[in-house]
Amino acid sequence: MKFEILTLFPEMFEIMNESIIGRAIKNGIIEINLTNIRDFSEDKHGHVDDTPYGGGAGMVMKPDVVYRAYQSVRKKSNGKVIYLSPQGKRLNQEKVKELAKEDELILLCGHYEGIDNRVIEEIVDEEISIGDYVLTGGELPAMVLVDSVIRYVEGVLSKDSTAEESFSESNLLEYPQYTKPDKFLDKEVPEILLSGNHQKIDEWREQQSILTTYKKRPELLTNAQIETAKKLLNE
Ligand code: 9WO
């Protein structure tokens, strides 16, 4: 899968070369190309922004500069253009899976007080928000989107971790995890996990998922699951 990213701060994306994403890039499973919008400024000072018409604080990214950067990326990619903005539709796991089916995506990162609306109308296919808060730019949200989407690209994660998703395929939160040592700060690992009985372990984990969800995010549960959680609490 290929991501084309339009940004004024390409250096911010360097941290993605580490870790799992970095490995997937090295293996050629995913490709991330960065385009510095500033390279498409044509004035002698390299300006990419200007004062807002109508007055007010801050600066607005110039439409012609963003448009030229977009055209240069368009030559290399047929992908949908996604603008990361607090005004977009909220990203969730369902949307993530949908995006993972695409071969290519173009991510547009704004800065300052935003981008001239005419170029947004002209080039953006979809506006996506990762949450209801305002940041200084769309770069971190773009990285969040890439990170969440590539988990579904074949070969990025081990076979195992994608199979494990069967639980989170449901609406439930994860069950609690433990590793060695079996005693830590006087707390023991739940005995069942040491039993080797995988049927019982799977059962226990599903129950824990329902209980955790009931306690932390009850709004995610169906009525039937709420009844199950109440029953488990009474045991
Ligand atoms: C700042 C501002 C200040 C005064 C008047 C209007 C204003 N609008 C903005 C603004 O929304 N700036 C954005 C900064 C422009 C687009 C890039 N920026 C951004 C993206 N901040 N937060 C996001 C974002 C993207 C996706 N999900 C959550 C937040």
Image (tube, grey):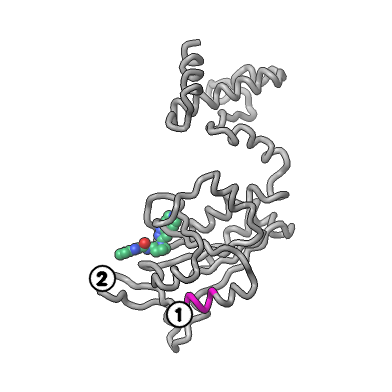
Residue 141 percent location from the top left of the image: 48, 56
Front: mark 2 or 1: 1
- Ligand 1 position by quadrant: bottom left
Q: Residues within 10 Å of mark 2 (few under 14, many from 20)?
A: few
Q: Residues within 10 Å of mark 1 (few under 14, many from 20)?
A: some
Q: Cβ(mark 2) to ligand 1 < 8 Å?
A: yes
* Position above or below: 108 against 158: below
Q: For the point 31% across and 74% down, which residue is it? A: 52
Q: Which residue is mark 2?
A: 56
Q: Main secondary structure of the magenta part?
A: helix
Q: For the point 71% across and 49% down, which residue is it? A: 154
The picture quadrant where one finds residue 178 is top right
Front position in the image: 165 or 126 = 126
Q: Which residues are magenta?
A: 66-70
Residue 22 percent location from the top left of the image: 66, 57
Residue 175 percent location from the top left of the image: 57, 29
Judged left or right of residue 99, residue 223 is left
Front position in the image: 99 or 34 = 99
Task: Give SS at disc 2.
Answer: loop
Q: Which residue is mark 1?
A: 64
The picture quadrant where one finds residue 217 is top left
The residue at the far top in this view is 235
Q: For the point 65% across and 48% down, which residue is it? A: 152
Tell me if residue 154 is in the magenta stretch: no
The residue at the far left in this view is 55
